[in-house]
Amino acid sequence: MTDPAADETREPAAGSPAGLDLDRLGGYLARHRPELAAGPPRAELIAGGRSNLTYLVRIGERELVLRRPPLGHVLATAHDMAREFRVISALAPTAVPVPRALLLCPDAEVLGAPFYLMERVPGEVFRSRVRTDQLTAEQRRELAMAMMDTLATLHGVEPASVGLADFGRPEGYLARQVRRWAGQLDRSRSRPLPGIDELRDRLAATAPDGTNAGRIVHGDYRLDNLLATVAPVTVTAVLDWEMATLGDPLADLGLLLTYWSVLGDSDNSAGNPVADGLGPRAGFPTGAELIDRYAAGSDVDVGPLHWHVALGCFKLAVICEGIHYRHALGQTLGAGFDTIGEMVAPLVAHGLTTLGEA
């Protein structure tokens, strides 16, 4: 039996943050996980806009984290709660740091979209220069290297050993990535985007075979998708697994370099909601140093990364355009997204230039 129908236009309970009706959440927990319903839940939005929405939920003395898709999300395949829940559950016994998964609710009638709950993990998200500028030079270096060591650990996990042998289709992964993001782009188009179709076509025509395919890939691996401590420097959790699958780990590296060396080293990086506080301009090691560290701890052949960086530029351009589209519709929560559409053109230009260097 499902809860009474709900949608995101109904009036939520008093004190509820947007997208999370606390009365409905409390009622659902009381029926399905009474041990998590020690009292009325309280919550606050802690991240929103470019990805799924993340809330800190307090029930009595316990602190949990709830994840759900964006309000009015238009690209449903990019916000798969069951996928996130499955991968963090599978990785729990490995050396990859992930939060403990507690509850998956696939019923969209409860909160207006599927959601899941996980334990809150100690640590901090280093998302902006306001925070990273407080780090010492040594802490920045150690944090960047810990980020790469964790990625190498993830890519070293044998999928079958954690029940993820069927988590994706490694064959043709890179070509499918181009097609997938081209499809996402078409569903988010609201204005002319010069060059983006050329970038799509050139990526499709030159997609590598993916000799490293078959590894668990995160799909959006970057510094601000990690929780970390600095005394000592430790990655305590990898977050935001909505795009995880089995594929080529070089796609993770290419996208990371796009954040780090393309956006992070641009004149527009300050205050940028997806690149502020990243890269050499923020006092971190260079992208080349990151790749060297990864290669030292991984059996993945990093090889030339030009194509993968260009794919990262295309993917991130599409993501930014999707956020721009949702912001124009008034469906984006979070600060700084009013100018995110300005990032699309430079990303497309860099992607085309990078393909010319391959």
Image (tube, rainbow, N blue to C red):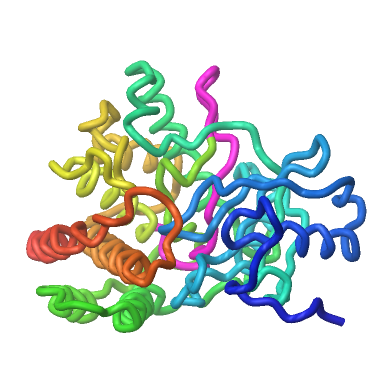
Asked where in the image residue 60 lies, by quadrant, the reply is top right
**Along the line of sight, the residue nearer the viewer: 134 or 139:** 134
Q: Measuring 41% from the left and 20% from the top, which residue is drawn there?
A: 139
Magenta stretch: includes residue 231: yes
Q: Measuring 28% from the left and 35% from the top, which residue is drawn there?
A: 289
Whether 228 is drawn above or below 109: the answer is: above
Asked where in the image residue 140 lies, by quadrant, the reply is top left
**Along the line of sight, the residue nearer the viewer: 313 or 110:** 110
**Along the line of sight, the residue nearer the viewer: 237 or 95:** 237
Q: Position of residue 170 (x, y in %)?
A: 47, 73
For this view, does 152 lie left or right of residue 179? right
**Quadrant where the image shows the N terminus:** bottom right
Whether 53 is drawn above or below 264: the answer is: below
Magenta stretch: includes residue 115: no
**Along the line of sight, the residue nearer the viewer: 242 or 203:** 242
In magenta, the rendered stretch is 228-249
Whether 191 is drawn above or below 261: the answer is: below
Q: Position of residue 94 (x, y in %)?
A: 67, 47
Q: Position of residue 233 (x, y in %)?
A: 51, 24
Whether 352 is drawn above or below 47: the answer is: below
Q: Position of residue 312 (x, y in %)?
A: 29, 61
| Numbered label tally | 0
Q: Measuring 26% from the left and 52% from the top, which residue is drawn there?
A: 258
Asked where in the image residue 297 lies, by quadrant, the reply is top left
For this view, does 100 lie left or right of residue 261? right
Q: Measuring 68% from the left and 68% from the top, which residue is drawn there?
A: 111
For this view, does 253 lie left or right of residue 306? right
**Quadrant where the image shows the C terminus:** bottom left
